[in-house]
């Protein structure tokens, strides 16, 4: 199961395994209104071998990633006003074989992706979907991932990512609406899960017994 909470609504998916030989595995997406205590079925997908992850919602849209039995993945979008579903992006048009891990604001959907067009040592780009324009652009800035499964961070229009330059990692923030850099900082500590708004940067330096850092006034 994967789930997402937005406003008064919880969106979640349910995997139903076949009960007999004639049945198929199904994935279902539901919405639950926490004020009215009502549940609605939004989508039912039947496939012999799929995995669903990255269920994300904002005011107008619901996004998710489906991986089929042949390890191919597709990014889908549902319009929450009319429940129409469209395929936004697919592994057959992407150099990344690993299903993407997305982050969402009301205006943009972003994810990391390997990019064979980049120079040696700089193998990742940040993909940016402008939801209203329905266009995808690539953002390059020596982006560094600790893992190919890393998820980028977006707060309103501000994205946060790791940049590696001369073997040194730094946290960078960029405003997609203003098209300018907000700030950059290279801490001495390790950097995991960086996030920010237009005034603060936050990150931690490990797992388990880790330290959390807050940098104020970018």
Image (cartoon, rainbow, N blue to C red):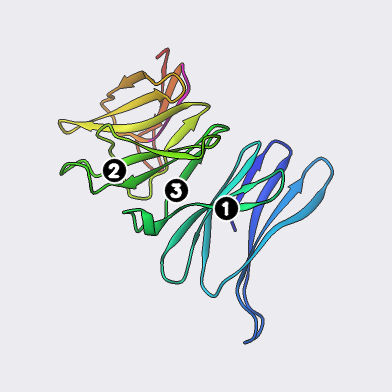
20 vs 186, nearest the viewer: 20
The residue wearing badge 3 is 101
Give the SS element for disc 3: loop
The residue wearing badge 1 is 86
- The secondary structure that most of the magenta stretch takes on is strand
Give the SS element for disc 2: strand
Q: Nearer the viewer, mark 1 or mark 2?
A: 1
> Mark number for residue 116?
none
Label 1 environment density (alpha carbons within 10 Å; few <14, some 14–19, many ≥20): few
160 vs 207, nearest the viewer: 160
Q: Position of residue 163 (x, y in %)?
A: 27, 32
Q: What's the residue at 31%, 21% (across, down)?
A: 185
Residue 196 among magenta residues: yes
Q: Position of residue 152 (x, y in %)?
A: 42, 38
Q: What's the residue at 70%, 36% (across, down)?
A: 7
Quadrant for the C terminus in the image: top left
For residue 136, which quarter of the picture?
A: top left
Q: What's the residue at 53%, 27% (across, down)?
A: 156
Q: Could you tell me how far apart the alpha carbons at marks 1 and 3 are, in whole angstroms?
A: 18 Å
Q: Could you tell me how far apart the alpha carbons at marks 2 and 3 are, in whole angstroms?
A: 13 Å
Please state if 217 lies on the left or on the right of 107 as rendered: left
Q: Position of residue 141 (x, y in %)?
A: 27, 31
Q: Could you tell me how far apart the alpha carbons at marks 1 and 2 are, in whole angstroms?
A: 26 Å
Count of number-bearing discs: 3
The residue wearing badge 2 is 124
Q: What's the residue at 51%, 72% (across, down)?
A: 49
43 vs 218, nearest the viewer: 43
Please state if 3 lies on the left or on the right of 8 as rendered: left
Magenta stretch in the rendered image: 193-198
Q: Nearer the viewer, mark 1 or mark 3?
A: 1
């Amino acid at each position: 199961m994967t789930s997402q909470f937005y406003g008064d609504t919880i969106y979640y998916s349910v995997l139903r395994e076949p009960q007999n030989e004639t049945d198929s595995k199904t994935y279902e997406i539901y919405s639950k209104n926490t004020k009215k205590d009502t549940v609605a079925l939004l989508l039912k997908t039947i496939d012999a071998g799929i995995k669903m992850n990255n269920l994300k919602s904002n005011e107008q849209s619901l996004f998710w990633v489906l991986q089929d039995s042949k390890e191919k993945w597709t990014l889908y979008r549902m319009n929450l006003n009319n429940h129409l579903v469209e395929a936004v992006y697919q592994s057959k048009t992407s150099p990344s074989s690993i299903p993407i891990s997305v982050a969402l604001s009301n205006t943009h959907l972003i994810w990391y992706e390997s990019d064979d067009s980049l120079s040696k040592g700089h193998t990742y780009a940040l993909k940016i979907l402008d939801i209203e324009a329905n266009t995808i652009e690539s953002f390059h800035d020596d982006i560094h991932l600790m893992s190919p499964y890393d998820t980028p961070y977006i707060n309103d229009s501000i994205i946060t990512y790791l940049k590696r330059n001369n073997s040194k990692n730094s946290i960078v923030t960029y405003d997609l609406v203003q098209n300018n850099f907000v700030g950059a900082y290279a801490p001495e500590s390790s950097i995991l899960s960086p996030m920010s708004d237009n005034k603060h940067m936050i990150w931690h330096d490990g797992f388990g017994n880790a330290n959390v850092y807050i940098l104020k006034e970018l």
